[in-house]
Image (spheres, rainbow, N blue to C red):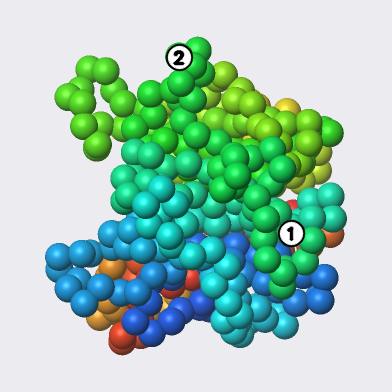
């Protein structure tokens, strides 16, 4: 399929996907929106779980730091996957201290239960990120901690066991994605591994993905000892899904390995534990790729580049097939509005 304004096709992988840009999914005046995870509710509506926080008064000083300081998780609802979406409520509040800045939510409906995974840190410290798991039977009731989690909902912390590949992660464990595959439950996560040949520090890190498995949905989850993705391809913001008996990861191309850093990657596995580098392909491009020329001219840039870096890919799955993609971007032409999320319609072949 030829590239046209608003539509582009990913080819050459075991899953070919055409992307049609629909528009902005969620934006709020005076607010940064980051990450939008969709699910169909029992009411037939599309519910979005969104990380958001107030834009700082002093943008030059604070920048985009609110994501690990004051982020909270909100719920929106719409009649259609394309919106419009209306704010419903705050689902997970920032409590500061050891339950700080709930962020990067991902929502699933598995075994007739809704499962909300997200991250928190301790006292604005990104090196102490950990993964939470909440469960509910209905999207409009209060969430509870998963049975196999700690009392506050913590499901995964950075492991202390040196035999596990991510025991020395300098960002804890973060950015979860959950699936059920071959009778077990797989919780994928990001870790950041320092290079021993470089000077120690927060920015000495390379992002890779691992998985923890459980025989029950609500855990506990046990770490698989080995890294799943190639050390030659840096990635983050994975969304895992199953299709045609395979496991796929759609992710950000963190290191610009197969194109510009503004786009993403598609990974494939037969077992959910091995994702060969040679089968990894380009998934999506920058926001500007799908818009008319000049559509982002003069836009406020809060994160990424002027091309519109796309991050936090999350999919709407309907009857086992991915139908819509939601992505976050740090650019917005609308005055007074911060980062926002966009929605794309998918055509899977």
21 lies left or right of 215? left
The foreground one among 347 and 23 is 23
**Disc 1 packing (10 Å; few <14; some 14–19; many ≥20):** some
49 lies left or right of 125? right
The foreground one among 192 and 304 is 192
The foreground one among 319 and 87 is 87
How many labels were placed on the picture?
Answer: 2
Identify the residue at image location x=28%, y=59%.
65
Q: Residue furthest front?
A: 151
User: Which of the image's four quarters has the N terminus?
Assistant: bottom right
Task: Tell me: residue 157, above or below residue 297.
Answer: above
Residue under circle 1? Answer: 136
Of pointers 1 and 2, the one earlier in the residue sequence? 1
Task: Tell me: residue 179, above or below residue 278.
Answer: below
Identify the residue at image location x=34%, y=38%.
127
CB within 8 Å, label 1 to label 2: no
User: Which of the image's four quarters has the C terminus?
Assistant: bottom right
324 lies left or right of 6? right
Q: Which mark is residue 33?
A: none
Check disc 1 and report its element: helix, strand or loop: strand
Residue under circle 2? Answer: 162
Check disc 2 and report its element: helix, strand or loop: loop
Q: Position of residue 306 (x, y in %)?
A: 29, 67
Identify the residue at image location x=22%, y=17%.
197
Identify the residue at image location x=55%, y=20%.
226
Examine the rendering and report whether any part of residue 269 can be seen. no
Q: Residue furthest left?
A: 61
Q: Position of residue 43 (x, y in %)?
A: 81, 76
Q: Position of residue 25 (x, y in %)?
A: 54, 76
């Amino acid at each position: 399929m030829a590239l046209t304004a608003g539509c582009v096709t990913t080819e050459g992988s075991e899953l070919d996907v055409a992307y049609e840009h629909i528009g902005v999914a969620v934006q709020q005046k005076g607010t940064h929106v980051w990450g939008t995870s969709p699910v169909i509710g029992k009411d037939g509506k599309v519910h979005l779980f969104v990380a958001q926080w107030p834009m700082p008064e002093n943008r030059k000083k604070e920048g985009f730091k609110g994501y690990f300081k004051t982020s909270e998780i909100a719920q929106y609802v719409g009649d259609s996957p394309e919106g419009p979406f209306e704010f419903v409520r705050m689902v997970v509040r920032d409590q500061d201290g050891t339950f700080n800045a709930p962020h990067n939510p991902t929502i699933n409906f598995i075994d007739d239960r809704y499962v909300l995974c997200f991250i928190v840190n301790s006292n604005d410290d990104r090196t102490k990120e950990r993964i939470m798991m909440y469960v509910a039977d209905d999207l409009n009731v209060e969430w509870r901690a998963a049975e196999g989690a700690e009392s506050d909902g913590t499901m995964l912390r950075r492991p202390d066991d040196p035999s596990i590949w991510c025991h020395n992660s300098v960002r804890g464990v973060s950015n979860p994605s959950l699936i059920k595959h071959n009778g077990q439950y797989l919780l994928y996560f990001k870790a950041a591994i320092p290079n021993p040949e470089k000077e120690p520090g927060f920015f000495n890190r390379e992002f890779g993905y691992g998985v923890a498995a459980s025989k029950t949905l609500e855990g506990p989850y046990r770490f698989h000892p080995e890294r799943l993705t190639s050390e030659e391809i840096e990635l983050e913001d994975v969304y895992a899904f199953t299709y045609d008996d395979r496991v796929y990861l759609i992710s950000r191309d963190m290191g610009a390995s197969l194109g510009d850093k503004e786009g993403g990657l598609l990974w494939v596995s037969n077992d959910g534990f091995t994702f060969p580098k040679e089968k990894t392909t380009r998934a999506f491009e920058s926001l500007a790729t799908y818009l008319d020329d000049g559509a982002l001219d003069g836009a406020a840039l809060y994160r990424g580049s002027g091309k519109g870096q796309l991050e936090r890919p999350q999919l709407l799955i309907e009857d086992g097939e991915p139908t819509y993609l939601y992505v976050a971007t740090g650019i917005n032409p609308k005055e007074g509005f911060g980062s926002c999320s966009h929605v794309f319609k998918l055509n899977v072949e």
